[in-house]
């Protein structure tokens, strides 16, 4: 059985950012609240872009920040 962190590492390697963020945003151990918030916002911007556009969020920037966070934590 694979651990969730291994699944995230494989998703990052494959460039499957939505999958990686969906799983990693809920991690609690060895992740700061800021990193978790960044990954959550990135995932939410992918799933609900219209809502975040309405409230003035820079969607490409938020997604890029989330990708950077998950990549720095679980990248190869």
Image (cartoon, rainbow, N blue to C red):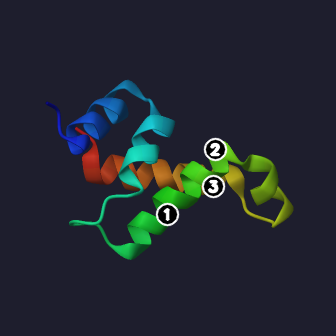
Q: Earlier in the sequence, mark 1 or mark 2?
A: 1
| Image location of residue 46, percent across then percent down | 63, 44
User: What residue is disc 1 on?
Assistant: 38
Q: Quadrant of residue 58?
A: bottom right
Residue that sits furthest to the front in the current view: 1
User: What residue is disc 3 on?
Assistant: 61
Within 10 Å of disc 1 (Cα), the crowding (few <14, some 14-19, many 20+) is many
The quadrant in which the N terminus is found is: top left
Q: Is residue 22 left or right of residue 13?
A: right
Question: For the residue labelled by badge 2, is the local secondary structure a helix, a strand or a loop?
Answer: helix
| Image location of residue 76, percent across then percent down | 22, 38
Residue located 46% across and 45% down the image: 22
Do the CB atoms of the residues marked 1 and 2 lie less than 8 Å apart? no
Report the disc number at residue 46: 2
Q: Earlier in the sequence, mark 2 or mark 3?
A: 2
Q: Earlier in the sequence, mark 3 or mark 1?
A: 1
Within 10 Å of disc 2 (Cα), the crowding (few <14, some 14-19, many 20+) is some
Q: Is residue 33 above or below residue 50?
A: below
């Amino acid at each position: 059985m694979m651990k969730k962190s291994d699944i995230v590492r494989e998703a990052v390697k494959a460039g499957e950012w939505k999958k990686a963020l969906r799983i990693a945003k809920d991690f609690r151990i060895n992740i700061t609240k800021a990193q978790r918030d960044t990954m959550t916002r990135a995932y939410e911007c992918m799933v609900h872009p219209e809502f975040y556009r309405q409230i003035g969020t820079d969607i490409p920037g938020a997604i890029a920040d989330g990708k950077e966070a998950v990549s720095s934590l679980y990248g190869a």
